[in-house]
């Protein structure tokens, strides 16, 4: 009777404690400490919440498995420890089929479940738009980025980030970074290519990155949903100045996007760069590179003949 009363009291208290703990979580904690979320503002893209849910759900599942496993280990270590005066081996248990089936089937279900949720979300994220409003070819090169705005037929040719030589500002970027402009709430497709070695296109707050593989085009389709400036970088070790292969993404209104396109036209950046600056194998008769290494360590734009 007393044990029943305790349950009646403890269960609601435990439930209330869990609800209070969850309600007290900040935006950062609710999204598993992932970047890109700001309280009271839209998500960075239409897919960031999906990525966050998969991340947090996986961690909760794995944490629950870990807690149960640790609890069982501690329980058996305490309850079945050797007592004073005991000698010899404890009673041995062998060939217990129910237990063996349990610890074989349960992990299999967990692995299949995590795989199923991951495959479902990945399929949705990787689905391409039939007619995206914005289409951009992003080229990675040692060690900068080029952007072709395909529908507008203009381009933006980037240079490698130059870091401060002042010890007090060590690591601070002094040069203008290559900047990719996107329109808020417009379906966007980025076609990812490399001019030389393998790179990886990573916009940190978008919670997604995709590789740029030599000789292959990868696609990333999403809709940016919050105006702002976001940091991007190469996430694949690609040579000596990999750490300086930085860029920015600016999600802006349609009017600001149109103004940027007009500015590129005014600068004479009309047409598409395409693969003309790709580094070619010498055996094919040419070697062109939009990222040759200058004497001061900065990337310059140019071509080198045979």
Image: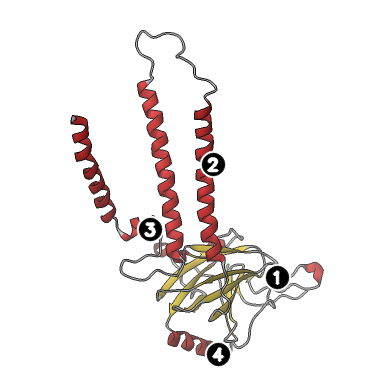
Image location of residue 139, percent across then percent down: 61, 72
Q: Residue 265: which numbered mark, if any?
A: 4
Q: Is residue 244 visible?
A: no
Label 4 Cα crowd, 10 Å radius (few <14 / some 14-19 / many 20+):
some
Q: Nearer the viewer, residue 3 or 183?
A: 3
Nearer to us of marks 3 and 4 is 3
Secondary structure of the residue carrying numbered label 4: helix
* N-term mark: 3 or 4: 3
**Which of pointers 4 and 1 indicates the residue nearer the eye?**
4
The N terminus is located in which quarter?
top left
Position of 70 with respect to 191 (left or right) is left
What's the mark number on residue 279?
Answer: 1
Q: State the separation of the CA atoms marked 4 and 2.
A: 57 Å
Q: Which residue is mark 3?
A: 31
Question: Can you tell which of label 1 and label 3 is closer to the viewer?
Answer: 3
Specify the quadrant of the image occupied by residue 273: bottom right
Is 208 placed above or below 130 here?
Answer: above
- Tell which circle, 1 or 2, labels the residue nearer the N-terminal end: 2
**Outermost front residue:** 1
Position in image of residue 302 (x %, y %):
66, 77
At 22% from the left edge and 44% from the top edge, which residue is drawn? Answer: 12
Taking depth in this image into account, of 15 and 75 the one nearest to the observer is: 15
Mark-to-mark CA distance, 3 and 4:
41 Å
Quick one: SS at disc 2?
helix
User: Residue 153 at x, y = what percent?
Assistant: 60, 86
| Mark 1 neighbour density, 10 Å: few (under 14) some (14–19) many (20 or more) | many
Q: Which mark is residue 161?
A: none
Question: Residue 269's spot in the image, x, y percent?
Answer: 59, 87
Residue carrying label 2: 108
- Residue 157 higher or lower than 196, as above or below: below
Which element carries disc 1, helix, strand or loop?
Answer: loop
Q: CA distance from mark 1 to mark 3?
A: 41 Å
């Amino acid at each position: 009777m007393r044990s029943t009363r305790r349950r009646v009291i403890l269960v609601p208290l435990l439930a209330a404690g869990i609800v209070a703990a969850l309600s007290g979580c900040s935006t950062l904690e609710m999204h598993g400490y992932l970047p890109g979320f700001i309280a009271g503002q839209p998500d960075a893209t239409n897919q960031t919440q999906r990525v966050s849910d998969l991340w947090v759900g996986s961690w909760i599942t794995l944490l629950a498995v870990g807690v149960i496993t640790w609890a069982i280990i501690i329980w058996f270590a305490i309850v079945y420890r050797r007592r004073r005066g005991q000698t010899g081996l404890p009673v041995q248990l062998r060939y217990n089929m129910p237990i063996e089936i349990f610890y074989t089937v349960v992990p299999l279900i967990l692995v299949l479940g995590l795989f199923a949720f991951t495959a479902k979300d990945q399929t949705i994220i990787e689905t391409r738009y039939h007619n995206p409003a914005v289409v951009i070819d992003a080229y990675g090169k040692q060690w900068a980025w080029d952007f072709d705005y395909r529908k507008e037929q203009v381009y933006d040719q980037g240079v490698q980030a130059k870091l401060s030589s002042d010890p007090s500002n060590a690591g601070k970027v002094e040069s203008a970074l290559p900047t990719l402009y996107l329109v808020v709430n417009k379906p966007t497709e980025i076609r990812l290519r490399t001019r030389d070695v393998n790179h990886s296109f990573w916009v940190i707050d978008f919670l997604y990155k995709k590789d740029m593989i030599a000789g292959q085009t990868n696609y990333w389709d999403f809709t940016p949903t919050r105006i702002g400036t976001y940091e991007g970088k190469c996430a694949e070790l690609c040579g000596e100045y990999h750490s300086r292969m930085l860029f920015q993404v600016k999600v802006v209104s349609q009017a600001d996007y149109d103004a940027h396109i007009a500015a590129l036209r005014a600068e004479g950046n009309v047409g598409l760069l395409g693969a003309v600056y790709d580094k070619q194998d010498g055996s094919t008769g040419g070697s062109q590179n939009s990222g040759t290494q200058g004497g001061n360590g900065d990337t310059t734009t140019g071509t080198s003949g045979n």
